[in-house]
Image (tube, rainbow, N blue to C red):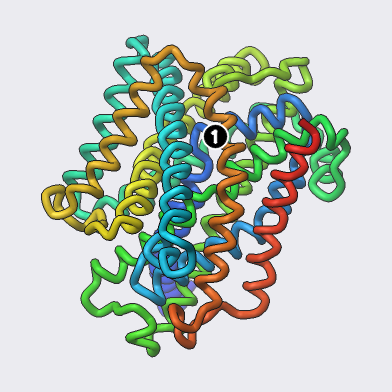
Amino acid sequence: MTTNTKRVRRGKTIRGRLRLVATVEQLGPGLVTGAADDDPSGIVTYSQAGAQFGNGLLSTLVLTYPLMVAVQLVSAQIGRVTGKGLARNMDEVFHPLVVTSLVFLLFIANTINVGADLAAMGSVGALSVHLDRHLLTVVFALLSLILQISIPYRRYANILKWLTLVLFSYVGVLFFVHVNWLSVARNLVWPQLDWGNATTTVVAVFGTTISPYMFFWQSAQEVEEIEAAPEKKPLKAAPRQAASAFARIRLDTFSGMAMSNIVGIIIMICTAATLNKHGVTNIQTATDAAKALEPLAGHLAFALFSLGIVGTGLLAVPVLAGSAAYAVGESRGWECGLDNKPWEAVGFYSVIGAATIIGVGIDYSGLDPMRALFWSAVINGFVAVPLMVGLMLVASRRRQMGKFTITRPLAILGWAAAAVMAAAAIAMVAVH
């Protein structure tokens, strides 16, 4: 091989790596939002689905992917176009009392999620390091609060972005279980189960996959991106930035939601191939799911599953608490944003602290956090519907979006997502 040929190949390799780095650098709010969706609450719900119904509910995550993408694209575009978060925009669509009620329900659901996620992290951590689970819960809560309060937004956003790599631990579990891939393929396309018995779980899967806190978080993070970079402006004021901004948002959102749903599918497949196959159909906690895997799939599979629970919890808790703070703060007209110092946005950081402290209290209260967690996913399924209606109304109004109202295909998918969520919620009420 000649020297010139080696130089050409080396040059191509370097350019390829630079393109990959440039692509990764474009990922941010959408990637973190999608990864945070696979928090311990999602792991419990997907594990319950796989344990109870085998591969039967895999198609729900195929269905939710385009719907998730549509809703999150709309959320991101609202933030990037207007330079304001979702709650502040919704104030112009709904009566303030309606917005306050929806934000209150969001805070309740998010706080339950925070408490259950912290409890799951403490319980799984205790299995590995043999410390008191309550103590570990407090440690994880303090770690989350310290990171949010003390680290500048840009650095903190990068930490969250790299934490998404922990989701690959679930891909590793696949190598330790025997999977019936024919059954997987069949159920991805056409599910084989009694839908009447699965209605509540379907609503929970939808509620934990298309979650209201994701709308607020991704919209708010687009606002943070504007405020953290002096050259960036809301697109209504700087329309020339639209082409590159929308291209980044699409790449970011499609990638983040794909990661979220693929990991959800993998968890269902793993629990179907192990727990359901061996008659273990009642999973009450994320710890139950991890422990049950060990005798069936081996210690390394248990370790990988446990790592995923702790890692996604560290990613999701600040997103859950932060999205509640954005929603409450924006609806009250407070100064909001992780780029602010605590004394510059007292109300905003107070909500983050309150959600986290109450979450820790749930762990100490004697309540069954995982059962509450499952039902919080169901609550999310109901709360999402009016929020999605408000989301679509905001995104379609020229007064707020200027010439950047959403396209017709995106509007159709967004309204379809709201309709599917409404139908799932109504079906659950009808069956129960």
Is residue 13 visible from the viewing direction of this image?
Answer: no
Is residue 416 visible from the viewing direction of this image?
Answer: yes
Nearer to me, 12 or 25: 25
Q: Is residue 150 above or below residue 135?
A: below
Q: Is residue 321 above or below residue 120?
A: below
> Residue at point 65% right, 56% down?
65
Residue 3: percent from left, percent from top: 41, 75
Q: Secondary structure at mark 1?
A: helix
> Residue at point 76% right, 16% down?
278
| Circle 1 residues within 10 Å: few <14, some 14–19, many ≥20 | many
Residue 202: percent from left, percent from top: 72, 39
Give amino acid for label 1: Ser
Instruction: Determine the image quadrant of residue 407.
Output: bottom right
Quadrant including the C terminus: top right
List the residue tagged with mark 1: 376
Residue 159: percent from left, percent from top: 31, 48
321 vs 312, left or right, is left
Nearer to me, 2 or 378: 378
364 vs 51, left or right, is left
Q: Is residue 389 above or below residue 133?
A: below
